[in-house]
Amino acid sequence: MVTAVRPVPGPAFVAGVVVSTWLDAAPPAGLVAWMLIAHPPPRRPGESVERIETSLLGMAGGLGLRASSGRVPDIGDRLTVRGPHLVLDYGHPDFCLRVPRPTVRWIEYALGGGQVCLVLGLDAIGPGAGPEAIDRYLHRVTARDRALVGAPAVRRR
């Protein structure tokens, strides 16, 4: 199967994504630092479900993510801690994504070499979704093969 190459979106698109982080025990892996990236439904002029999905697929390509139904690929040193901020290199040549409000424990776990799993969901999610809504979202997108995953590591300066 040939997959079309999509451009990695810039900061205007990335500013609208929903990002959530949490720590969770995931048997048999043990503790995992999770990061979810998704997008709310179209709400700005020129946005459409198709354009949003194309941009999300561009991010997935830039990150080297794969379908959640397969093995989670190691996508390399994509995370950087800059002071109190966590930054994700999502494959754009000039811009990164600043991850909003990860906990100190999440950052310390990732810095200590703990397992991190990034999930990019292709279906829309409401901004401000709480843990139960995120759990339902993850079950839905993985069951429908609408999630892409990868295991980023923390870049050492």
Image (tube, grey):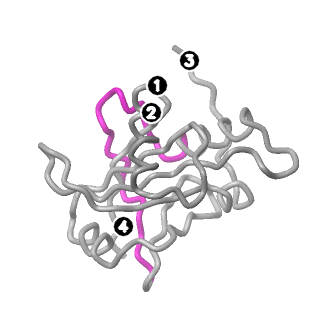
Secondary element at tag 1:
loop
Which of pointers 3 and 2 lies earlier in the amino acid sequence?
A: 3
Residue type, mark 2 in image: Arg
Question: Where are the magenta residues, as a range?
Answer: 61-82
Which of pointers 4 and 3 lies earlier in the amino acid sequence?
A: 3
User: Picture coordinates of residue 61 (x, y %)?
Assistant: 54, 39
Select label 3 or label 1 by which is in front. Answer: 1
Quarter where residue 96 is shown: bottom right
Total tally of numbered discs in the picture? 4
Which residue is denoted by mark 2 in the rendering? 140
User: What crowding class fits label 1: few (fewer than 14 Cα within 10 Å), some (14-19), or many (20 or more)?
Assistant: few
The residue located at (48%, 69%) in the rendering is: 87
Which residue is denoted by mark 1 in the rendering? 144
Q: Are circles 1 and 2 on residues that touch, CB within 8 Å?
A: yes
Which residue is denoted by mark 3 in the rendering? 2
Which of pointers 2 and 4 lies earlier in the amino acid sequence?
A: 2
Secondary element at tag 4:
loop
